[in-house]
Image: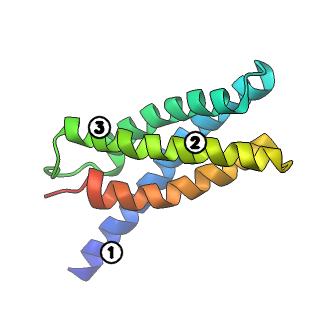
Amino acid sequence: MKDLIYKTYKLSVFRYLVTGGTAFAIEYGSFLFLFYILNFGSVLSNSVSFGTGLITSFCLNKLWTFKGGKYTHTSRRQLVIYMLVAITNLIFTNLSINILIHYNVPGYVAKVVLVALVACWNYIIFKKLIFKNQ
C-alpha cells in the first residue's frame, strides 16, 4: 500500500511540474511580450500575464494533474478558492516584482524567481485543499 501511495504522489508531482511548466511558459512569454515588446509597465504586464497563466493552470490542474475520483469541493467552490489564492499570489508578485526591479533585478529574472516561489506553496494548497479527493 505504501508503494502505491508513493507512486501516486510522485505522479501528481510530475504532472504538477508539467502543468506548471506549461502555464509558466504561457505566463512568462506573455510577460516578456507585454513588458519588453509593448512596453507596458511591470504591474500591468505581470497582472495580464498572471491571468493567462492562471487560466491555463486551473484548467490543466483540474483536468489532468489532480484528476481523480470525487473531489471534496464542487467545481464552483474549487474555482472560488483558486481565485482567492490567485489574488493573494498576484498581490504578492506585484509588490515583489516592483521591489526587485527597483533594486535593479532584471524583470525577466524577477519573474522567474517569483513564479518558482509561488509554485512551491501552490502545490501544497492545490493538493491538500482545492483539488482534494474524498
Which residue lies most toward the right here? 104
Residue type at numbered disc 2? Phe
Q: Which residue is mark 2?
A: 24
Which secondary structure lies at badge 3?
Answer: helix
The answer to which of 6 and 36 lies nearer the viewer is 36
- Report the residue at 79% width, 27% height from top: 36
Q: Earlier in the sequence, mark 2 or mark 1?
A: 1
Which residue lies most toward the bottom here? 2
Q: Earlier in the sequence, mark 3 or mark 1?
A: 1
Whether tag 3 and tag 1 are in contact, CB under 8 A, the answer is no
33 in relation to 82, above or below: above
The answer to which of 130 and 91 lies nearer the viewer is 91
Q: Which residue is mark 1?
A: 6
125 in relation to 47, above or below: below
Q: Which residue is mark 3?
A: 79
**Labels 2, 1: front one:** 2
38 in relation to 73, above or below: above
Q: Residues within 10 Å of mark 1 (few under 14, many from 20)?
A: few
Residue type at numbered disc 3? Leu
Say which quarter of the image contains residue 46.
top right
Asked if residue 74 lies left or right of residue 120, the reply is left
